[in-house]
Image (cartoon, rainbow, N blue to C red):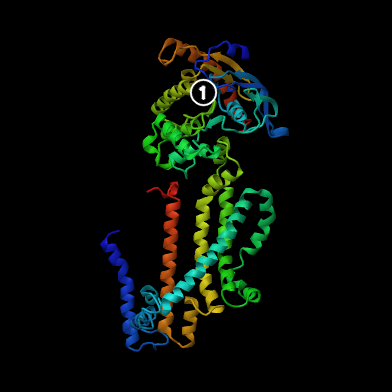
Amino acid sequence: MNRFTALRGALLPIGLLIVWEIASRAGLFSAVVLPPPSAVAVRWTSSLLPALPYDPASQSYTEWLLSGELPHDAAASLGRVLAGFAIGVGLALPVGLLMGTSDRLYGLVNPLLQILRPIPPIAYIPLAIVWFGLGNPPALFLIALGTFFPVLVNTVAGVRQVDSIYIRAARNLGARPWTMFARVILPAASPFVLAGMRIGIGTAFIVVIVAEMIAVSDGLGYRILEAREYMWSDKIIGGMLTIGVLGLVIDGAMSRLNDHLLRWHRGLER
Amino acid sequence: MGAAAMTMPARSPAAPAGAEIAIAHASKVFGTGDRAVVALQDVSASVPEGQFVCLLGPSGCGKSTLLNAIAGFTPLTEGAIRMGGRPVTEPGPDRGMVFQEYALFPWMTVEQNVRFGLDIKGVRRGEAEAVVARITETLGLTDFRARFPKDLSGGMRQRVAIARILALDPPVMLMDEPFGALDALTRRTLQDELLRIWSEFAKTIVFVTHSIEEAIYLADRILVMTYRPGRLKRDIAVTLPRPRDSASAEFNALKRELGGLVMEEQERFTKAELTGTAVD
């Protein structure tokens, strides 16, 4: 990785932006179909910045700085992803650990799991609205659902592949069931569990955008759909780019967490 | 057999009470019907406290099965094993096991691995740290305490595995071909280290190996086992003074004698393998 490879990587996006800008300005497409990148940038910046002037009496400086529409929407989407993800993981992890350790429970639950698993979380939208109405509850339900299955399936697989030599060694040292669970089985399964979480948060991020288009009145998904009503294509594209950046941040954070938690793992040897 | 062993002086001084192992008519059959494999057949022996015993034989002679039965991992089909008069029913930290595959917990550092048994036992933090410091020092692991197993050589890993069970100060150490995967020089170093630990910490050791030389170098007594069904073929006391010189005439005389015994069993194993009756 040297400067020239980085430069070469930047060549295509920059070139594309220039061509796009020229084409838009030359009137090749209307601003509704494809606004020029400069218009997107202007629109994006204005939604990023606070709408009202700074008033020290009613708010702190940071509050004011983040009072723009975009920070609010991004925080709302991120908050939903994290809350739904936490619910999904919180349910999938114990169920997965139990299913992985008990063959009887596995035999009982696995067929049902295999039937439910291929249903995309988005297909649950109508039912989610019937069950939970509008607002955050159906959105969180859908996000939790999107997280639940990948984490569950991977946790079960992770626990089932734990090398019996570790179990034997721990029993030899006197480990009782709880210690075995917390300090042997869970860490031994953690590479699988974490891989499941990474898939889970990716799904959660897709689901949050769709859920926001339907059930709630803020968040990045809601905002780009709202912009369509007014044919604000520059705002739509700006929102899409924000979604992309947020996804990148989430995945990057997940990947760093992964590297830290699995620093003992052979696969990560430098 | 037991009587012969009892007449032999235990070299390890002041072994802790209740460490003698009594194996009475131990049999183990794996599988049923046509596929049944008799791994152990009517094995009886007693290992007095402080003795270093090697179980020697080719693959499939049941030596690992016997070790696993003493460890409490493998229930016997018939017979019983007692330690210090109490029947062995499950694995326990009084019989620390060192596995050939190290079996270190890769997600724990060296220090955490060594401390794990103490954590389970509920030893207080300060006390546990003192034990870990002492044991890692004994095995020359002090500088490696913060490392993960993946960053250690095979020899270092096996040191950690030994340290891990020593931390619990078990009266009995069970070792399943612990040095089998190591190069010759590392192996010799660890053998010497083990002998030092054995005499310093007064352990009873049951050590499985298929290396004749290793058995003679280490053991007070060698139990040669037969290939399927696994029985005791010969019970030999090794009285050579330590440290043993593997180039000496006595060492080599013993090596020749044992070599003959083991080869008979190895030939039966090879024959079974060639006729396809060796199931393993």
The x, y position of residue A187, in whole percent, is 52, 48
Task: Indicate whether A119 appears above or below B59.
Answer: below
Q: Let me know if residue A233 appears in the view.
A: yes
- Residue drawn at (50%, 21%) of the image: B202
**In this rendering, position of residue A233 left or right of residue B237:** left
The x, y position of residue A122, in whole percent, is 58, 72
Q: B117 or B140: which is nearer to us?
A: B117
Q: Which residue is mark 1?
A: B203
The x, y position of residue B3, in whole percent, is 62, 12
Q: How many residues crowd around disc 1 within 10 Å: few (fewer than 14), some, or many (20 or more)?
A: many
Q: Which residue lies most toward the front here?
A: A57
Mark 1 lies on a secondary structure that is loop
Query: How many discs appear?
Result: 1
Task: Indicate whether A70 appears above or below A116.
Answer: below
- Residue drawn at (57%, 78%) of the image: A215
Task: Indicate whether B21 appears above or below A206.
Answer: above
Q: Let me know if residue B274 appears in the view.
A: no
Q: Quadrant of residue B271?
A: top right
The x, y position of residue A78, in whole percent, is 47, 69
Q: B105 or B87: which is nearer to us?
A: B87
The quarter of the image holding the N terminus of chain B is top right
Q: Quadrant of residue A139?
A: bottom right
Q: A54 or B208: which is nearer to us?
A: A54
